[in-house]
Image (tube, coloured by chain):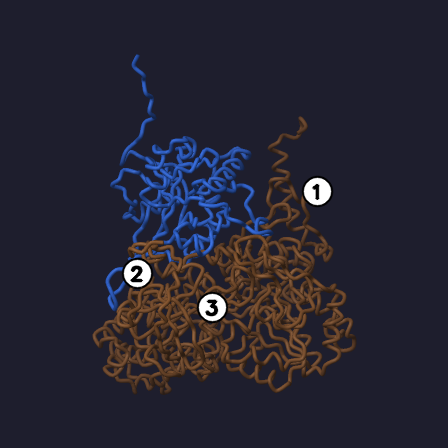
């Protein structure tokens, strides 16, 4: 330090410098060339011991939460929620926290690979915790990879080229959609197991039937006083869990208002139901009937002339069929009708049944009794994100079945897969695995060696989300319209390449209409072209006179959003004027037990390869690193089962062997298995661990085309072997401890 | 010759006010495990794998406890209870350490764990009524390149060393250094612990309990019925819980 510049001043200046460069690095297309390197070649904005923070968007699910990633000398160290992003306001879920274990995962695809279908991408060591793993080497360069993609585009008829994409990122979906629209290749299909378990199509269809407008409803949990949730696991993975958890905190807040109450209707106590004031373990399939009965009783209490919607239901009948006593139904109806802010939410397993659409309509209709539409604590339509259209919605399971049929019929000659792992996420009964052999060429852009990548002829790995440009539209959960922006927070760790760049380069090579469809130099230029129209939008969180400055802010804040309320009010005028069906659901298969698959709150569909997510205890059972079947202790006793006893569970679609967890909060006639494990590939931490409950789900759909995943009946048979589950709660009973047979 | 023992004054019960503290609202906590993951990422905590975690050797510095009341159908899950080191004012782990590895810091009024003093007797874990200490039974591996995400501000522990929640002392020091260089006091809310920062329900609040104007103090005052766990043992915990329901 010189005499004139004190250390304090120097640090101040350094701070200013860091802040300025955070903006400057975003200036101009040249910024994409800025490399973040180790301190031997220190970039100008890096100071030893000082961290640099970048705003980006989480890619662990499709919700689009903003992240701030702490980096130091080119390495990403920690993710935090972006306080600016109106969706998550500085918060994250466990998966967002563990995203770095994806970035630095020891089993990533390290470069472009020409691959024989079925061939392993790494050797599985006997002990996944030692270092000796041999990852498949890249055996081609990116020029050859790009040429392969170009040939695939050029040498096939456009209508025989298909793209199967994940729920994120949206910018890549837009790029492929533009390509498809301009060249006549098939419209890209997007899918995700979460959207399947959320029953999004059913929610949207029910809204259309009741309010004359399809769309994703937004439930203002935070403003409500009484929330009736029929199967919606909104504190776990449903739609936008971080945003809904904030809503829940608002519901519970008791300093400035009365503490709000939550009642959860479902046959198995999820961790959402665990937080509820009342858990109603109704008989699966009677949700619609119960909702209508509560609606009828509530109308009587409020003195409303009985609308057609509730006229057919008999509360006494509903009580006897559902197993909820009539007095309890009356109590619930009073609670709902007399509240100053009642709200009813349909979701999850309740909609994943043969009568799922009727359930969604009946529950949405409850909201019409208290007329909470467009009011605080009520039902809205989600604010539409910039450029959001119906075109970008995820495919329902039925549409996926049609897609698979197309593959089998030989209508798809080349299949590009990005951001989704259908071999794991789709039920086996939908036959995606069997259909791949009818597709002559499959090109995967997988970041990780997942099951679908193993069935591909080429793997051209995309960057990890934290190494990527892009944006994600916030489909629901925020008050205003939000476009969450992504930028690389570190330079790519391996020889991966942005799929958008590969497609743009390949389109240029293919020439003709392909080149004309994607006239961009690279992904960043494409991103600029999509973001440019936002400059002229009013009510933005920021504005800028030119695109370079706008993009600098876009990167600095991690996206762009409106400051105004973008939610719309459903038209409920006719919501109750039609007859609604309270018929019970039909269940497929023989067996004495209802089967409820549910998404693991910590692993979800793609978390299994992150070791710390594996080691997070399940919120309800505290089991780690494996799959279990939840069974009422009374049922277990009748069947002569104890904890950790392996049972074979048989449905019409398949058989699974899984250890028993005696779960006190599940109906005796119901069993439940979490979804998230059971990988046969996907890296050392995921592979050969637990089972995948989708193997038991048959090809049954509800009226909206969503999978009737909770509409199965199954048989249970004791095998006579044990598989000790690792659990945080207590080791009593595990490894024989406490049973007098300690090893 | 009589030896004069100088024991620093220990304030008991009502007279005791800590420095850094936490309030946890169990009615808000959804048990989502975001805090557990955030803590592991911030503090370089090892994962131990299925077998060792089955033996109870997992290294969570914070865990969510939930218990069952009643039996079906009248079964209830008790409000989720995040359990972490309570940073006791009179910590029972401290006097039993033969190596002075777990000591009370005068500056932060926290219960420290000095890794390079620890010889692994595990007396402290044995004596902790909250069962929040975890022991490195092995050198747990982080296959390359997982080690790239290690936080340079936090020591990586090896086999035979006890560890536990530090209230993110690295963040406390960073904020204090910054405030000092700017010639001011640390402002309430300027920084927080990893668990509190992640918590989507904002169930965890961290701050100065000796400052009546801080958010933690205000919450404790407004809420009125905060509970300290196992208070009857005289451990003087610095974490206050609001019971749910």
The residue under label 1 is A40
Q: Position of residue B72 (x, y in %)?
A: 25, 67
Q: Secondary structure at mark 2?
A: strand
Kindly tell me whether residue A596 is visible in this rendering.
yes
Q: Quadrant of residue A64?
A: bottom right
Using the image, determine if residue B39 lies above or below residue A238. above
Measured Cα–Cα span from mark 3 to mark 1: 44 Å
Q: Position of residue A346 (x, y in %)?
A: 39, 74
Callout 1: 10 Å neighbours few (<14), some, many (20+)? few
Nearer the N terminus, badge 3 or badge 1?
A: 1
The residue under label 2 is B77
Residue furthest to the top? B1
Measured Cα–Cα span from mark 2 to mark 3: 24 Å
User: Which of these two is toward me, A579 or A233?
Assistant: A233
Is A68 left, or right, of A632 in this rendering? Answer: right
Kindly tell me whether residue A256 is visible in this rendering.
no
Using the image, determine if residue A65 lies above or below residue A7. below
Q: Quadrant where the C terminus of chain B lies?
A: bottom left
Measured Cα–Cα span from mark 1 to mark 2: 55 Å
Callout 1: residue from which chain?
Answer: A
The brown one among the chains is A
User: Which of these two is toward me, A468 or B65?
Assistant: B65
The residue under label 3 is A239
The answer to whether mark 3 and mark 1 are in CB contact below 8 A is no
Q: Quadrant where the N terminus of chain B lies?
A: top left
Q: Secondary structure at mark 1?
A: helix
Q: Specify the colour of chain B.
A: blue
Q: Which mark is residue A213?
A: none
The answer to whether mark 2 and mark 3 are in CB contact below 8 A is no
Q: Secondary structure at mark 3?
A: loop
Q: Position of residue A197 (x, y in %)?
A: 46, 73
């Amino acid at each position: 330090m010189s005499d004139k510049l004190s250390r304090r001043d120097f640090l101040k200046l350094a701070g200013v410098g860091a802040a300025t460069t955070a903006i400057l690095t975003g200036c101009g297309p040249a910024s994409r060339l800025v490399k973040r390197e180790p301190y031997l070649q220190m970039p100008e904005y890096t100071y030893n011991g000082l961290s640099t923070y970048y705003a980006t968007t989480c890619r662990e699910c499709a919700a689009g939460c903003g992240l701030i990633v702490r980096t130091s000398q080119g390495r990403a160290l920690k993710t935090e929620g972006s306080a600016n992003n109106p969706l998550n306001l500085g918060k994250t879920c466990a998966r967002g926290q563990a995203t770095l274990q994806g970035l630095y995962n020891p089993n990533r695809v390290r470069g472009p690979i020409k691959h024989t279908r079925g061939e392993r991408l790494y050797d599985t060591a006997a002990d996944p915790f030692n270092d000796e793993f041999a990852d498949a080497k890249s055996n081609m360069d990116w020029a050859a990879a790009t040429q392969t993609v170009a040939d695939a585009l050029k040498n096939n008829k456009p209508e025989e080229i298909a793209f199967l994409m994940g729920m994120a990122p949206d910018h890549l979906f837009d790029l492929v959609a533009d390509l498809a629209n301009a060249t006549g290749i098939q419209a890209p299909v997007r899918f995700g197991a979460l959207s399947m378990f959320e029953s999004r199509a059913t929610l949207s269809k029910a809204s259309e039937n009741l309010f004359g407008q399809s769309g994703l409803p937004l439930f203002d949990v935070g403003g409500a006083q009484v929330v009736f949730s029929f199967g919606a696991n909104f504190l776990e993975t449903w739609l936008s869990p971080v945003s809904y958890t904030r809503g829940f905190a608002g519901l519970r807040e008791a300093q400035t208002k009365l503490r709000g109450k939550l009642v959860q209707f479902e046959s198995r106590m999820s961790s959402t139901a665990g937080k509820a004031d009342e858990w109603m373990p109704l008989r699966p399939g009677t949700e619609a009937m119960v909702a209508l009965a509560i609606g009828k009783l509530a109308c009587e209490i409020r003195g409303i002339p009985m609308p057609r919607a509730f006229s057919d239901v008999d509360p006494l009948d509903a009580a006897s069929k559902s197993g909820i006593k009539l007095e309890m139904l009356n109590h619930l109806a009073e609670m709902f009708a007399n509240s100053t802010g009642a709200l009813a939410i349909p979701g999850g397993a309740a909609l994943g049944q043969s009568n799922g659409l009727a359930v969604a309509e009946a529950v949405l209709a409850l909201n019409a009794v208290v007329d909470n539409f467009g009011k605080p604590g009520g039902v809205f339509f989600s604010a539409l994100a910039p450029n959001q259209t119906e075109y970008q919605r995820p495919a329902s399971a039925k549409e996926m079945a049609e897609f698979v049929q197309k593959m089998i019929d030989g209508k798809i000659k080349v299949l590009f897969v990005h951001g989704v792992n259908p071999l794991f996420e789709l039920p086996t009964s939908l036959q995606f695995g069997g259909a791949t052999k009818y597709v002559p060429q499959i090109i995967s852009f997988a970041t990780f060696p997942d099951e679908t990548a193993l069935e591909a002829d080429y793997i051209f790995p995309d960057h990890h989300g934290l190494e990527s440009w892009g944006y994600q539209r916030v489909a629901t959960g925020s008050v205003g319209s939000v476009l969450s922006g992504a930028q690389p927070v570190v330079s790519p760790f391996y020889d991966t390449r942005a799929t958008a760049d590969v497609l743009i380069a390949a389109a240029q090579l293919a020439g003709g209409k392909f080149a004309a469809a994607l006239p961009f130099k690279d992904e960043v230029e494409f991103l600029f072209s999509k973001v440019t129209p936002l400059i002229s939008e009013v009510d933005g969180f920021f504005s800028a006179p030119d695109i370079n400055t706008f993009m600098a802010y876009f990167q600095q804040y991690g996206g762009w959003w409106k400051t105004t309320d973008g939610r719309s009010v459903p038209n409920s005028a006719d919501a109750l004027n039609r007859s609604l069906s309270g018929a019970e659901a039909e269940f497929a298969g023989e067996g004495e037990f209802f089967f409820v698959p549910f998404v693991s709150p910590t692993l979800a569909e793609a978390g299994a390869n992150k070791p710390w997510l594996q080691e997070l205890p399940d919120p309800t059972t505290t089991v780690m690193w494996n799959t279990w079947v939840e069974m009422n202790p009374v049922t277990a006793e009748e069947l002569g089962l104890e904890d950790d006893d392996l049972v074979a569970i048989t449905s019409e679609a398949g058989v699974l062997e899984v250890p028993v967890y005696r779960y006190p909060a599940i109906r005796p006639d119901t069993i439940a298995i979490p979804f998230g494990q059971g990988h046969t590939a996907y890296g050392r931490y995921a592979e050969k661990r637990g089972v995948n409950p989708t193997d038991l789900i048959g090809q049954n759909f509800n009226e909206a085309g969503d999978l009737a995943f909770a509409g199965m009946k199954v048989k249970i048979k004791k095998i006579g072997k044990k598989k000790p589950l690792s659990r945080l709660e207590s080791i009593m009973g595990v490894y024989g401890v406490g049973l007098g047979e300690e090893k | 010759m009589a030896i004069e023992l100088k024991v620093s004054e220990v304030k008991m019960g009502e007279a005791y006010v800590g420095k850094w503290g936490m309030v946890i609202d169990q009615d808000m906590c959804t048990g989502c495990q975001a805090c557990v993951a955030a803590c592991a990422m911030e503090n370089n905590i090892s994962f131990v794998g299925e077998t060792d975690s089955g033996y109870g050797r997992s290294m969570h510095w914070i865990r969510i406890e939930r218990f069952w009341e009643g039996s079906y159908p009248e079964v209830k899950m008790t409000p989720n209870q995040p359990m972490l080191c309570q940073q006791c004012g009179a910590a029972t782990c401290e006097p039993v350490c033969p190596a002075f590895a777990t000591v009370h810091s005068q500056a932060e009024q926290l219960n420290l764990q000095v890794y390079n003093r620890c010889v692994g007797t595990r007396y402290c874990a044995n004596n902790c009524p909250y069962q929040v200490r975890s022991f490195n039974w092995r050198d747990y591996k982080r296959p390359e390149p997982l080690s790239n995400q290690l936080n340079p501000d936090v020591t990586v522990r090896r086999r035979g060393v006890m560890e536990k929640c530090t209230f993110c002392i690295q963040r406390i020091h960073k904020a204090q250094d910054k405030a000092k260089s700017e010639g001011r006091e640390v402002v309430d809310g300027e920084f927080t612990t990893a668990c509190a920062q992640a918590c989507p329900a904002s169930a965890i609040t961290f701050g100065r309990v000796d400052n009546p104007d801080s958010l933690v103090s205000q919450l404790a005052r407004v809420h009125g019925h905060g509970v300290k766990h196992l208070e009857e043992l005289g451990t003087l915990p610095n974490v206050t819980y609001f019971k749910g329901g």
